[in-house]
Amino acid sequence: MPGSLAATPEPPYWAVVFTSVRTPDDPEGYAEAARRMLDLAAAQPGYLGAESVRGEDGVGITVSYWDSPEAIAAWRAHPEHRAAQSEAGRWYARYAIRVCRVERAKAG
Amino acid sequence: MPGSLAATPEPPYWAVVFTSVRTPDDPEGYAEAARRMLDLAAAQPGYLGAESVRGEDGVGITVSYWDSPEAIAAWRAHPEHRAAQSEAGRWYARYAIRVCRVERAKAG
């Protein structure tokens, strides 16, 4: 979540790295939907945490952490999340989603 | 790099997710070192790309992509990178490094 780092368990676990470039369209609607999606993700089974930053240049990175690929698949298929996904073409000039297995971690 | 997304090959490949919270210390020195580290990383064998964002709240996420864990280990051991790592306690209130295997990717 904004302003903080995720407290995750020992690896292995899973990460979804979502990187995007915003269009100038619909800043209020987007901000509200983005916040809602982070809140909704946090309520899903298998959710471990998330970190999200958007820079002044419109580039954003959100990383969410999950205990299994099945938890990620279930979150991807959530009806309200699906509805948000259908807005991707309006909100993002470009985006990439990478599903990753976290093998090692170090914190300081 | 700032303002753009990385163009990566088909998975599998590797990602290093570096999340941090900046201290207020040494903004100019930090900005220069951060830029230099991104440039130096881009010159290493096995480097595939990077995305980096820092928000106004001091939270930053940098994701660099690599073709193997060996490439990540070599970059971690680079002398100039090691020197920068030794400043982590001054630059960051908190940080986390996660080494991940990218299993699936989708771009839009």
Image (cartoon, coloured by chain):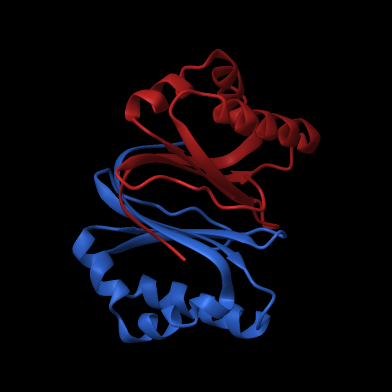
Chain colours: A blue, B red
Viewer-side residue, B42 vs B99: B42
Residue at image location 24% in from the left, 45% down from the top: A12
* Residue A66 shows in the view: yes
Residue A29 image-quadrant placement: bottom right
Q: Position of residue B60 (x, y in %)?
A: 59, 49
Along the horizontal axis of the image, is B14 left or right of B63?
A: left
Along the horizontal axis of the image, is A71 left or right of A108?
A: left
Q: Looking at the rendering, in which quadrant would you find the N terminus of chain B?
A: top right
Q: Position of residue A98 (x, y in %)?
A: 38, 55
Residue at image location 49% in from the left, 82% down from the top: A87
Residue at image location 52% in from the left, 77% down from the top: A89
Along the horizontal axis of the image, is B28 left or right of A50?
A: right
Residue B88 image-quadrant placement: top right
Q: Position of residue A108 (x, y in %)?
A: 48, 36
Residue at image location 34% in from the left, 23% down from the top: B70
Viewer-side residue, A6 vs A41: A41
* Residue B100 shows in the view: no
Q: Position of residue A70 (x, y in %)?
A: 19, 65
Along the horizontal axis of the image, is B57 left or right of A82?
A: right
Residue A71, relative to residue A105: is it above or below? below
